[in-house]
Amino acid sequence: MTTTETERATGSPASPGSTTYVGKPVDRVDGRAKVTGEARFAAEHHYPDLAHAALVHAAVARARITAIDTAAARAVPGVIDVLTHENAPAMKPPPKFSPLDLSTFVSATSVNYLATDEVHWNGQPVAVVVAETPEAARHAATLVRPAYQELPAVLDFAAEEPNAVPQKGNLLQESEADKGDAEAALKTAPVAVDLRFTTPPYHHNALEPHATTAVWDGDRLTVHEGTQNIAWLRKHLATRFGVPERGVRVLSPYVGGGFGGKAMVWAGTLLAVLAARAVGRPVRLALSRAAVYHTVGGRTPSTQRVALGADAGGRLTAIVHTSVSRTGRIGGMPEPVTAATRHLYAAPNIHLRQHVVELDLLANTAMRAPGEAIGTFAIESAMDELAWELGLDPVELRLRNEPERNPVDGKRFSRRLLREAYALGAERFGWRDRDPRAGATRDGRWLVGMGVATAYHPTLMLPANVSVRLGADGRVVVRCGLQEMGMGAATVQAQIAADELGVSLESVRVEYGDSSLPDAPGAGGSVQTASIAGGVVAACDKLKRMVRRLGRGAPGTYAEILARAGRDHVTAEVKANMPVFMIRTLLERRRLVKAACGVHFCEVRVDRDTGEIRVSRWLGVFDVGRIVNAKTAASQLRGGIVMGLGMALSEETLVDPRTGRIMNPSLADYHVPVHADVPHIDVHYLDEPDPTMPLGLVGIGEVSIAGVAAAVANAVRHATGVRVLDLPITLDKVLPG
């Protein structure tokens, strides 16, 4: 046993702030299982008599099914059944969203699949084929022939933009703000810019496509699923299939990427469970990449207006940021596009509005930094353009308008170190050496430019239930139904527990990914690490108090104290009270603004003849609170930047405005960045704890994508003199007309 462990076991104080593992670059505890193939994902669990399912997708946007011919599909050797609205077992309708029961948030759409003849979007599943092999199921699915009575459909986002209506806000997410008279101040500002931006739809392309393996045993259900919210999925399945929640077990030890796409319950999951119940056998449904596009929502497109007014010295006098995004008529999450603008820059006059249109398309959903990712493209591009109008350095413009308090409502920041991030970043990137003239820096045929942008993402916590077991042999087991999507979630909680209890990291095991474990919050909104850390710290504190009581003041190690007490282990449990927690959270939000933030510095090269754009250097400096694992934190921050590079330069979901059909549902046609597209990414973090958060932690999963597209656009502006307002930034947009 270590000295620290003895001190903590007997109640003596350890050195303030002393750590052994927190902050270190520890290897992921699941790394070996993943590289050796030992890890099993949702589509890799085998059961006797396992059947396979495939979906049949509607080829029209809005209709009623008048007939559905399944004869040819049923004739395929190995086909077990074809489920349609004519013969499928009934599911309960999806629950309506309730702010008192956040688990209803996972209802991706209001559609009750295979319980109606209605078609709500092009790609909606209208039948499920179950067969002995996946090949037979996929082939038979192509032979199902639905007939439709087509109905009028609203599909064109650009055409419907004038019909947008104000977006409704909620307790955690405001949709509008007014301070002073921004439009009037804009008209009288000595210097102003007024720009219109557009961003296209984007789709998730996680390494692991969505898959479900469902097994019924009477009214008991076991589901293997890659999900970002185990507890809420379990509750949703129990509700939809009318069985007790305790009889549903969701197993999700490994999730091959999520980014918001696996936060909701989509058609594939429900129809796999429905098919397993219908045929009385275990069923696996693994979506093709195209099926993911057609049944799992992505990011909404947007149009945005950003208008900025400033005095001659660069002090902002007016900020106007308005947006239009979309939802599906059957559901969807509007993007909080102006969210970051509420907090970034001081101005006496601010006007923020978000609007939304409903279309007959698949419901959109959360995608990494929803709102902030696309909103910062607009506000940070506009700030850069204002700097050009003023003849002022873009970094200096931002620093002159850095607020002391939250710009909209005057709330205090829990802590905010953007000035420090800008100073460190500018020094390390060599910003002072930048020639301020557009197009002045060349390297052969390449035009070289530098850009900068601010990153921002709010910080939030949710309650987590955790148990910690300490054995007489010194082994520690942390139990929590958290989600591991590849970011090292179990590793960082093991580091925290090891330090809290003063034991070796090797002696700590984290059990996770199972609904039979204590409930955890979902992995979304950058909330998971800090939320669960709060539970782990509380459980460890409770356990140490229990051990001290057992020791009755006598010194000794954990093992010695437990041996004297005749105990082979001791377990501490922490159970969160959701209503109390949410009330405290809302009260705190009235006083404080908490966020992760940072700054991106980017260098691009643009071929003067072809318009080819290459990102050649990148530096990100982040204020993200205390760092638990230096290795996984850097990986998370780099991953967000890479995703932002895709948003900036290549990614775009193409939707036919006549039919609602997604035209590029594959990695052959939807272009995500590959290694050749990504430069070396230098990331730094200030590692300053937030005093209002458990262990000072602030979420890091999403902040680094915010501002990336703007940094690229600003660098392209510096290299070429061309301001690109519409993503992605393709070569035709930078070449002379």
Image (cartoon, rainbow, N blue to C red):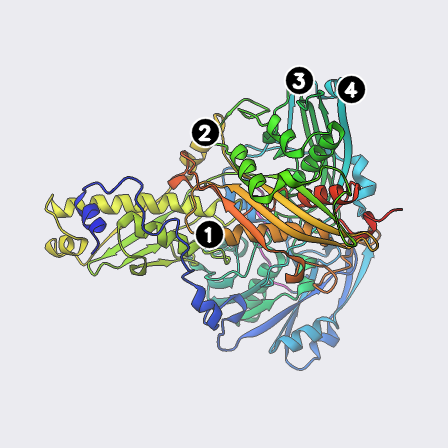
| Callout 3 amino acid | Gly
Separation (CA) of disc 4 from disc 2: 37 Å
Counting residues from the start of the chain, the first of labels 2 and 1 encountered is 1
Counting residues from the start of the chain, the first of labels 3 and 2 encountered is 3
Mark 1 crowdedness (10 Å alpha carbons): few <14, some 14-19, many ≥20: many
Separation (CA) of disc 3 from disc 2: 25 Å
| Callout 2 amino acid | Glu
Magenta region:
88-97
Residue 446: give x, y in percent of width and height: 76, 52
Q: Secondary structure at mark 4?
A: helix
Q: Is residue 223 visible?
A: yes
Nearer to us: label 4 or label 2: 4
Label pair 3/2, CB-CB below 8 angstroms = no
Nearer to us: label 3 or label 2: 3
Report the residue marked by disc 4: 187
Q: Going 66% across and 77% down the picture, which residue do you hit?
A: 136
Report the residue marked by disc 1: 231
Nearer to us: label 2 or label 1: 2
| Callout 4 amino acid | Lys
Nearer to us: label 1 or label 3: 3
Counting residues from the start of the chain, the first of labels 1 and 4 encountered is 4
Report the residue marked by disc 2: 588
Residue 164: give x, y in percent of width and height: 76, 35
